[in-house]
Image: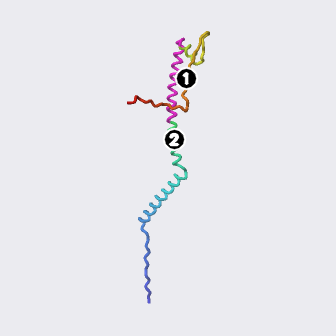
Amino acid sequence: MARKVRKTRTRWVSSQTLVIVCAVLAVVGAGLLEYSYIRFRNLEERHTLVRMRQAELESQREELKRLQTEWENAQKRKENLGADPVEIEATLRRIKQWVKPGETIYRIPVQEPPSHAPLAVPVEGPQR
């Protein structure tokens, strides 16, 4: 008597399905790696810091341009100063506070408003 051997079919996943599953797992894994890299390396804070430093750099560049213009103006004044003796005397008197013999200088002090005083006082118009 011969026994019948029953063949069992095992289900194997097709190669196309396996490729799709591996691709999805790779994408999810890459996303997790990217998230953890950004989070643990503080890239968001670093990005904010870079933005702040870029703004600071831009303001320093503007300040540099202003100072260069001021320097050029001072150089022109220096060149013009050598040609005009009246301008030389006026500049020395202003900067060094030089006085000619027998000359009296009158200075009017500038009074600053008290710190507790309001800057603007309301004015009442004519009443009707």
Identify which residue, 103 or 126, lies in the foreground. 126
What whole-number distance in Å separates the C-alpha atoms at marks 2 and 1? 40 Å
Boundaries of the magenta span: 58-86
Mark 2 near mark 1, Cβ–Cβ under 8 Å? no
- Among numbered discs 2 and 1, the one appearing first in the sequence: 2
Badge 2: few (under 14), some or many (20 or more) residues near its Cα, within 10 Å? few
- Taking depth in this image into account, of 45 and 96 the one nearest to the observer is 96
Task: For label 1, count other residues whose C-alpha is less than 10 Å away and answer few (under 14), some (14-19) or many (20+).
Answer: few
Q: What residue type is labelled 2?
A: Met
Which residue corresponds to mark 1?
A: 110
- Of all residues, the one furthest to the top in this rendering is 102
Kindly identify the residue that appears in the image at 50 percent across and 22 percent down: 73
SS for dot 1: loop
Q: Quadrant of the N terminus?
A: bottom left
Toward the bottom, the furthest residue is 1
Which disc is residue 52 wearing?
A: 2
Rendered residue at 55%/53% (across/down): 40
**Residue 49 part of the magenta-drawn span:** no
* Residue 110 on image: x %, y %: 55, 23
Three-letter code, disc 1: Val
Q: Quadrant of the C terminus?
A: top left
| Residue 68 spot, x, y in % from top left | 51, 27
The residue nearer to you, when weighing 128 against 51, is 128
Q: In this view, does 8 lie to the left or right of 82?
A: left
Horizontal and vertical percent position of residue 43: 52, 48
- Name the residue rendered at 44%, 61% in the picture: 24
